[in-house]
Amino acid sequence: MHATATRRSRSVPFSTRPGIGERLGIPYMDPLLLLATVALAGFSIFTLAEATLHDVPGSPYYYVERQSIYAGLGLLGLFLLTQIDYSRFRELRVGIYTLMFASIGLVFLFGAAARGSRRAFNLPFFNFQPAELGKVLLIIALAGFVIDGARRGSPRQRTARYLLLGFAPAALIFLQPDLGTSLVFGVVTLAVMFLAGVRWSHFLAIAAGIAVMVTAVLVVAPAVGTPVLKGYQEQRLTSFLHPSRDPRDAGYQQKQATIAIGSGEKTGRGDQATQTRLDFVPERTTDFIFAVVGERFGFLGAAFVLSLFALLIWRALRIVTLSKNLYGTLVAGGITAMLMFQVFVNVGMSLGIMPITGIPLPLMSYGGSSVLATFLAIGVLESVHMHARLSQKSRDSY
Amino acid sequence: MSSGFALRVAILGGVALVMFAVIFFRLWYLQVLSGDKYLVEANNNRIREIRVTAPRGQILDRNGHVLVENRTSLALQLNPQKLPGNAGERRAELTRLGHAAGIPLRRMRRDMHDQLKVLASAPVTLQRDVNYDLVYYLQEHQANFPGVAVQRIFVRRYPDGTLGAHLFGNVGEIDSKELKEPRYKGLKPGDQIGQDGVEYTYDRYLRGRDGQTRVQVDSLGRPTPGGQLSAVPPRPGDNLQLSIDSGVQAAGESGLASLGLPGAFVAMDVRNGQVLGLGSNPTFDPSVFTKPITQSQYKQLTSNTTDAPLTDRAIRGLYPTGSTFKPITAMAALTGGVITSATPITDTGGLTVGGITFHNAGGGAYGTLSLPSALQVSDDVFFYTLGLRMNGTLQLQKWAHRLGIGTPTGIDLPGESAGLLPTPAWRNRLYRKHLTDRPWSVGDNINLAVGQGDVQVDPLQLADAYAAIGNGGTLLRPHVGMQVVDTAGRVVQELNPSPRRHIPINPGYRSAILDGLHRAAQSPGGTSYAVFGGFPVPVAGKTGTAQRTGQADQSWYSVLAPYPNPRVVVTVTVERGGFGVDSAAPVAEQILSQYFHAKPHAVGGANGGSQY
């Protein structure tokens, strides 16, 4: 009784000076978005703790420690970003775009080779993959270019310009080679264009162009003897159509992931999760972490994770509509599309209905670059939300 | 906010909705609707069943002496499914393995091809008796040799070398055709089965049952720590005790070997059909079949130029019997009323029928004889006369058939020959088909009466016929298996096959014939008196000297002992051995010496204090 009274008395804003929370804008953040983000990161750490206890001899918490540090840093970055008015990024678009393009170009030239592709810089603490952060940078810069050039050139020219801006880094990443991330770049480009109001007829033309390209790459090019995709890439892309043809190829991995998830049944197998524990499912801390969740925690756990993602995306979509300006709308829309695409492709891959493309599951997959980039992207979303609320508040007060 | 923009945001939201709906439905389908199916698949993935080979039962002689046992050997095996998928890497690994093990790449590929054709998923055995240097090398460099394993296997060992080689047969991997046979029901590819001899006949006792260990493995098939889930221990095969007496067997083999001529011997208990010794010369080392056999080795074992050591002449060697046939002729003539044991027949040195004169083999003439003395001196004209008198009645053929001539004895060894008993119907049928130049004539019957002409008999058949005369009319089913004993020494199965038939034999006729044979062996003037005259045990034995076209005479001897109530029959034949008394009889004498020496208390009569 006494405690309740005390708490109420403290919560009444008698002071004229705004509190520290107020000054940081915390009341104007979207609490559900933050909740979903932190819960997913936390569940990722929990899953890694359960699944990787024996992975690194001598340090049972190798993955947990690192993922916790990444998430902590990410959360810090998220709060820092909310303190900046995202609209400032619009002015910095050229610099941001250059930084993004240069980092991707440099990793292509000097990055550390791993399994036949150059994707990361070897930093002392972790391997930094510029393309992960690059996704967010592209959205911020591209949205700026869109706003800035909205009156320049014919609609057709504008569409071509956006496509060039988005697909140039996508092509560079494709050459690393990192097919999955380049697809994300393509998708966010199209999403920003879509919300920017690019004509339907242009999208029709783009869709036709993509269809022709896919046909050329998958069917015509191999047929005439100049394959564009590497053998394993093509195999991964098409294997979900014929999952169990050869136990040695990519279809095998996908089948193992599907078996892992299916065998989790309703409540999961816990430590009996042999599919992921005994290496039948590859990349279980990163690309196939959803299979670990599905096998260990069953439908209950997997549905819980998906619900958090649904919450995340619902709040993100809401922010798209709340934004105080078109720039915020485009940035939030790009980020929302990025999250949607990654969740759908990654989870779909584990469920055997999407091709294997090596796209991480946001916040869940182990890895500093991806976790940090996702936290920052959500930081931008929170910034959009916060400034929408703040401007609404200032409008209200007048 | 324009309505166009609202539509676009709505579309984005709609896409998100559809996306989550698809994922949730798929998740529901996988985990809730068909989760149990995937759980089974997951368990199939992680559980590997490892077969633990059961050792095959031993083969012992009648006194418990070990004839065939097991030794462990290390076999180099390749699991094709675990080889690298990439053709170049696979080739590189096989080349490395070839260098390490000293196997040419081409031979390795051929072995893989041949063995995989039979069993597509079984490991391929590249080499047996791998030395330890290679095993250690492979263990140290395991990462370089995925799919290569060294497996402990059981291999047959023959402590007495060539002793009894023809009885055992080899053991080998079951092939795809055999897998379909009912007698191998329940066996799996890769199982070892007996391919010949008693290993084949008594395979189901000797085989045992493989054990099984279920272990948990990771995706590379490596057992995980503490991952043994369950284990069924292997059940070793039962031991097979043969009726063979190693001493008798050795005496027969060394006797034949000392002659250096192809031949065979059989020693059998006339009371129950237990074979005490059965062998063939030349012999071979049965252990050659425990390793992959080379073409030249196989040729050496089967070629006519080496007298085909692999052939068991005791059950597969077919020859005319010569005079050892005469007791059968005598039995037919006595029973058919053609003669009595006292009927005199005069030998003038030859018998002329239809313009052809049949002479005594020795060329002499013995004057007037009755049956016992005709057997004693092996008078040909006497038996020509019986053959002449029985022509057209089929009495001779009927009695020969009753005594088992021309039919397999049914011994528990595979691949026994049937032989041939010539009859008028048989020859006339051939003649109608233009397979021979003439129909049946009286000369054929005369020849048959002395074991010449078309008759074809293997030593075991003749021994069985003598045994039937010796035991008073029981035609036995010879057998080398005596009993099956489990590893704890308990008898699992007695092997007492019932006799083939009982022939009504007049005891008077039997004693008249045995009397003649006894005189032939142990009375002065008898055909084998030179060999058996001083033998401490009374015996009844008959020599035979069969003429064979294109080579020297075949030497035969068949003897029942002790006379007049025999327990054992010994039959010996020697290709190109000349007169029966010269080569076959001495071998039979060595076998009988060993038999009675080994059982001094069993010696009948008044000869207990002899040198034997």
Image: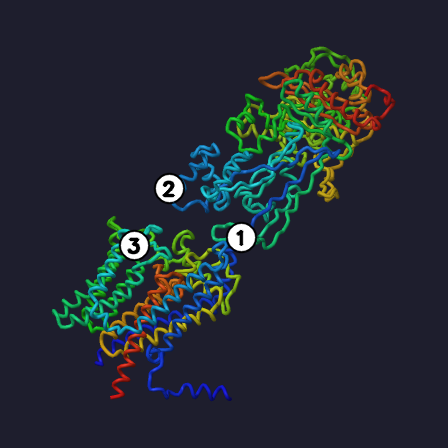
Residue type at mark 1 is Thr
Tag in front: 3 or 2: 3
Few, some or many residues within 10 Å of mark 3 (<14, 14–19, 20+): some
- To which residue does mark 3 refer? A177
Residue B469 image offset from top left, x and y in percent: 76, 29
Mark 2 → mark 1, Cα distance in angstroms: 30 Å
Query: In this view of the protein, can residue B343 be seen by the observer?
Result: no
Q: Would residue B188 appear left or right of A395 to someone viewing this image?
A: right
Name the residue located 28 percent from the left edge and 78 percent from the top edge. A387
Query: In this view of the protein, can residue A90 be seen by the observer?
Result: yes
Q: Chain of mark 3?
A: A
Please determine if labels 3 and 2 lie on a single subunit: no
Q: Chain of mark 1?
A: B
Q: Would residue A358 appear left or right of A192 to someone viewing this image?
A: right
Q: Quadrant of residue B449?
A: top right
Q: Secondary structure at mark 3?
A: loop
Q: Chain of mark 2?
A: B
- The label shown at residue B224 is 1
Few, some or many residues within 10 Å of mark 2 (<14, 14–19, 20+): few
Residue type at mark 3 is Pro
Q: Secondary structure at mark 2?
A: helix
- The label shown at residue B88 is 2
Residue A365 image offset from top left, x and y in percent: 39, 63
Please determine if labels 1 and 3 lie on a single subunit: no
Residue A398 image offset from top left, x and y in percent: 24, 88
Q: Is residue B7 above or below residue B398?
A: below
Mark 3 → mark 2, Cα distance in angstroms: 24 Å
Foreground residue among B537 and A385 = A385
Foreground residue among A331 and A23 = A23
Mark 1 → mark 3, Cα distance in angstroms: 35 Å
